[in-house]
Amino acid sequence: MAQIMNELKAKINGKNIPIVFPEGKDERIVAAVNRLAEESLLHPILIGPVNGEVHSNVEVIEPDDYAGKETMFEAFMARRKDKHTASEARELLKQQNYFGTMLVYQGLAKGLVSGAIQSTGDTVRPALQIIKTKPGIQRAFGYFLMLREDEKYLMADCAINPNPTAEELAQFAVETGKIASMYDIDPKIGMLSFSTDGSGVTEESIKVKKATELAQAMAPEMAIDGEMQFDSAFVPSVAKKKFPSSSVAGNVNVFVFPTLDAGNIGYKIAQRLGHFEAIGPILAGLNQPVNDLSRGCDVDDVYHLAIITAAQAIY
Ligand SMILES: CC(C)(COP(=O)(O)OP(=O)(O)OC[C@H]1O[C@@H](n2cnc3c(N)ncnc32)[C@H](O)[C@@H]1OP(=O)(O)O)[C@@H](O)C(=O)NCCC(=O)NCCS
């Protein structure tokens, strides 16, 4: 953890990336933001009302007094088209998360960290509605960075989509492959299933096979293969027996799960039985990064997620 954070800090250092923190009323957020400002790691924008003393390098914006309110309202209405009446929109923009998300959408900040007080839904929904997914990605998803000594893996989707289609799985695979460079991982992407290379044929394994083919067509330069079981993905001797034609099997370091059940259970087994440190979920697939804290977070969690968010903004 310390090493990866130092690497990410080196990547964002000196760039003064503006990151918005809508929950200025939470003392953990204020403490973390002060530390980020003190270390000049990024440019924190705190949405008021603020609870506590604030470092002089922190920009504080009070939505009620914000001079750009009308421009923001117009940009929101244009983005959301006929989804809200004008009075609904004005009410939504009074909410810190909608206000903060609009700052990111308008380019006044590069990313957002929230969720110390608000639920996942309330943190993530404005981002899905306003920032939206990148071209070519239909659904936002969440990955975990799994760390143990010098081992480093990515696992996705472990957080958002209960039952992705083959197209969506392919998009998660390619996007997670691109994300890998942020963590200095040379991606070998395994599309996981209960079946390896046609050993079990069901609707579920066919979906993963199709996702593999789509992903390979989308990113022919990337090392992607499947469908494969976890042991075929991870253990070279098993891969040799079960999937000898694959150069990816046995060397996988980016694991793409077929469903949210598998992904969420899978990363937790690695965390609890395998004693990996699990960093995330880190939201991916959006035009600009937005990340959700756990409500049980501490100051370190906010500090680390802010560094990750700033790094995402430049990848
Ligand atoms: C992501 C989440 C907040 C969306 O919930 P929701 O607001 O009830 O979802 P809705 O279907 O009403 O969608 C709201 C908007 O977001 C969009 N959206 C929903 N999920 C999306 C996704 N994965 N990617 C992109 N857009 C998405 C919808 O299209 C909709 O847009 P619109 O208002 O323009 O029509 C919800 O799925 C959630 O809470 N997921 C978290 C799952 C979880 O708790 N995981 C725990 C493990 S960490």
Image (cartoon, rainbow, N blue to C red):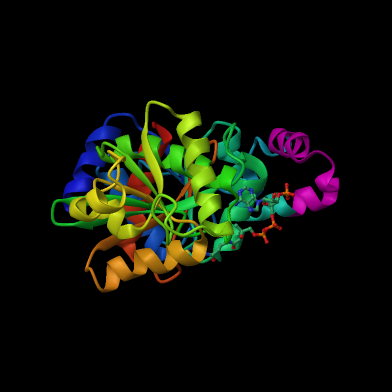
Hey, which residue is sitting farthest top in the picture? 221
Please state the total of marks drawn on the protein image: 0
- Visible residue check, residue 250: yes
Q: Nearer the viewer, residue 255 or 57?
A: 255
* Coordinates of residue 95 in the picture (x, y in percent): 65, 55
User: From the viewer's perspective, is 12 left or right of 96?
Assistant: left
* Coordinates of residue 4 in the picture (x, y in percent): 22, 47
Task: Provide the residue span drawn in magenta.
Answer: 71-91
Q: Residue at x 45, y 33 (%)?
A: 216
Q: Main secondary structure of the magenta part?
A: helix
Q: Residue at x 36, y 58 (%)?
A: 229
Q: Quadrant of ligand 1?
A: bottom right
Q: Is residue 118 above or below residue 16?
A: below
User: From the viewer's perspective, is 66 left or right of 208?
Assistant: right
* Coordinates of residue 49 in the picture (x, y in percent): 54, 57
Residue 115 shown in magenta:
no
Q: Residue at x 22, y 35 (%)?
A: 10
Residue 72 shown in magenta:
yes
* Coordinates of residue 280 in the picture (x, y in percent): 38, 57
Hey, which residue is sitting farthest left in the picture? 149
Q: Is residue 138 above or below residue 298?
A: above
User: From the viewer's perspective, is 182 left or right of 291?
Assistant: left
> In the rendered view of the protein, which quadrant contains the N terminus?
bottom left
Q: Nearer the viewer, residue 2 or 136?
A: 136
Q: Nearer the viewer, residue 182 or 87?
A: 182
> In the rendered view of the protein, which quadrant contains the C terminus?
top left
- Visible residue check, residue 285: no
Q: Is residue 111 above or below residue 91?
A: above
